[in-house]
Amino acid sequence: MMYLFFFGFLLVIFYFFIFKNFFSVFFKFFFFFFVLLSLFFLCENFETKHFFLSQSFFLSNQLTFTFDFFSCFFLGLLIIVGGSILSYSIWYFKEEIGSSYFIMYMMFFMTFMMMLVSSHSLFLMMVGWEGVGVMSYMLIGWWMGRSDASMSSLQAIYYNRLGDFGFIFFLVFALYGSGLLYIDSFYHNYISFFLSFFIMLGIIAKSSQFLFHSWLPSAMEGPTPVSSLLHSSTMVVAGVFLLIRLLEGFNILIMELLMVLGGLTMLFGAVCAFGQNDIKKIIAFSTTSQLGLMILNLSIGNIYLTFFHLCMHAFFKSMLFMGSGVFIHGAQNNQDIRNFGNVFFFTKMSSLGMFVSSMSLMGMPFLCGYFSKDLILENTWGPLLNRFSWFLFFIASTFTVAYSCRMLFMMYGGSNFGVYKLVCQEKFGNNFSWFLVLTFFSVSSGWFFYESLFKVIQEEYLFFYYKITPFLVIFFGFSLSLLVFLKFFLTMKTGKTLYYNPLMHNMFTFYSKVFSSFFWFFELLWVEVLCVIGLQKMVNFFGYFKSFFDLQVFFFMLLIILDLCFMV
Amino acid sequence: MTSVVPAGKLYKFVSHKRKVLSLYKRALRHLEAFCFEEGRHVFAYERTLLRARFDLHKDEPDFKRATQLLRLGEEEFWVNQHPDPVLLPNEEGGVTFQRHATYQVPERALDHWEPHEKAMFPDYFAKREKWQGIRRKTWSEEMQWLQEWDKKNIDNGISLTDALPAAKEKDGYPPFWWRTVTRPLEQPKLMEWWPNNEDSFSR
């Protein structure tokens, strides 16, 4: 049954040739089915599966897959995040030539990523590792006529190749040391230093740590769905994932080196993001910073906590990219936040996503990022050999809050700026409602997964002044951004209207259909809420489902209900 | 400081007025980037001062002095430029610059169409055959014609520009006419009117 997972995505590509006309509809049904399957895989545990081949060649008896906790959880996450992004990219690339090739490339990428994540043999993991690098090359250089994009895709290949050099040396040392290429066949011996050193090269190149980071901002030349899927959630965490798998046999000296490197990366990324003006580059450096945090955390030894943060990070970071994609479409391909201003009026849904994701990233209490980030902050108060790295982590967290607030202020504030007024993307013809699934996960997944799966992480019982550190981080970061951008904060507007405006009628009916009476109630409080018509519409709530020709929203509601059942 | 002049765009053939105006526009854009954090009123004040500096020498009678001033201005701009100016997307250095080049297909791709596809547009392909006949006729003479034009200009002491000679007869063919006539669209669009489009994979 597990092999369906791999062949499933290849089957989609096969079906695509047959059902070209109805691909988007077919894909939505297919995706929903896989989301349901993924919820099962979150709960079950499978053992290692071997490939039985009739021909024997070198390593033919070592082609194995494992579906343990990390694999199952990440596969479910990959399908949820990847499916949302693919559905979003159907809208994003509506006017683009060759959009079907794009979806095919993304499907291939997801297949390789699944192979990387669920492989027990390092040989198969190498196949997936290289495959995601190749697909990254093809997707970053999507607009190949643009010389900057071609160069950036080549740059990504060069940096990943440096890492592959280390990976191959690692394979050589592993074969020499134990004769096996399994991920759990490492123990501390005289060659563990060399093993750790060479795989460290692979990890820092793939996961863009300090000296190997420059390919990630250049990778923003690719389309926004590529940045959202590859360069925030899945491909760049391949290195971190490998380290999670291999940490038991890792050498202590290399772990110390990674701790410092992770801290440096975190600070570097956060400080660079504070000075960027291109919205995608801000989020790219933010990704670099969070990857540094993950590496730092792993070097201390918190495996499950890092994995938890990896998953939460995937939800809110891809959400940030997708929201920025809506703004980019609205500003006619302009990505400079100095040209945005007062965008809230036309982007209510996307702004919801952006705010929730940014708050998650900052570590605002009880959103999904809080549960992982707060636990990390608490766990690093314990005895450490290297206080310098922890100090870097604290400063970098402050800058994380600062650049998030800066981005939000410059987009939603500034009544004197805003050269461009956005073209409204949230209208009936455009359907990118699947991205709200990630908003839902950004809010609820932290608490849900903490209570159900990750509560076994060792908790620290801290003194009061240590416990309020995350809140101090938020406070200092917010005040840092206010110091520089106070006037943007003061000019933030909400786009309220005090009376019924016929120009807003279209937007109002759109939101009322999507969010029904709940949102509508708060939108026109001072106009109609207490009138008879309003009450009638609330009573006729269930009658709205008759007008939903598009079944996406229906499946979304069904997904929410199912999730609530699982919570119970 | 010999390389601050933007020489890549046939700079030596452009008139002095255009050079000055282009410098002013670029300076204004970079000034806006510098004054962004302080506020719009600061930018308004600074751009007035910049305009005054340009207006001080706008009626310079001596062309050598004017060229020297322009050169000094370009150097000053290069030294004081903003590291991250606000760029338009389709501008050089912008986000969507050259993006359309991905979909620009050269005209010779029409040679590779299948006969059943060419049969959909019989009048166009008939005309195209005629044009290609004319092109074969004029091709051998074009290079010789351009060399004669340059020689004539050099003999008369006229400096070389990027102006090409006019056509030899009324409604005739100027040099390099084929390149201009068959240039691809700047923003190629998908042919949604193409029949049976759903069967094609590249939709």
Image: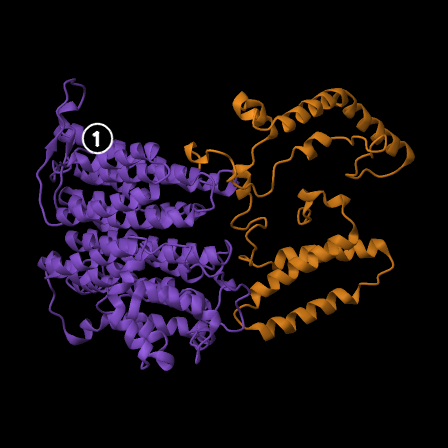
Near-viewer residue (B79 or B156): B156
Where disc 1 sits, the SS reads helix
The part of the image, by quadrant, that contains residue B130 is top right
**Where residue A77 appears, x then y in whole percent?**
22, 49
Chain bearing tag 1 is A
Q: Residues within 10 Å of mark 1 (few under 14, many from 20)?
A: many
* A247 or A40, nearer to the observer: A40
* Residue at 24% over, 65% down: A542
Query: Which lettered chain is shown in purple?
Result: A
Give the chain coloured orange.
B
**Residue A220 on image: x %, y %:** 42, 48
Q: Relative to residue B122, is residue B202 depicted above or below?
A: below
Q: Is residue A11 above or below residue A200?
A: above
* Amino acid bearing label 1: Phe
Classify residue A54 as left or right of residue B180: left
Q: Which residue is mark 1?
A: A123
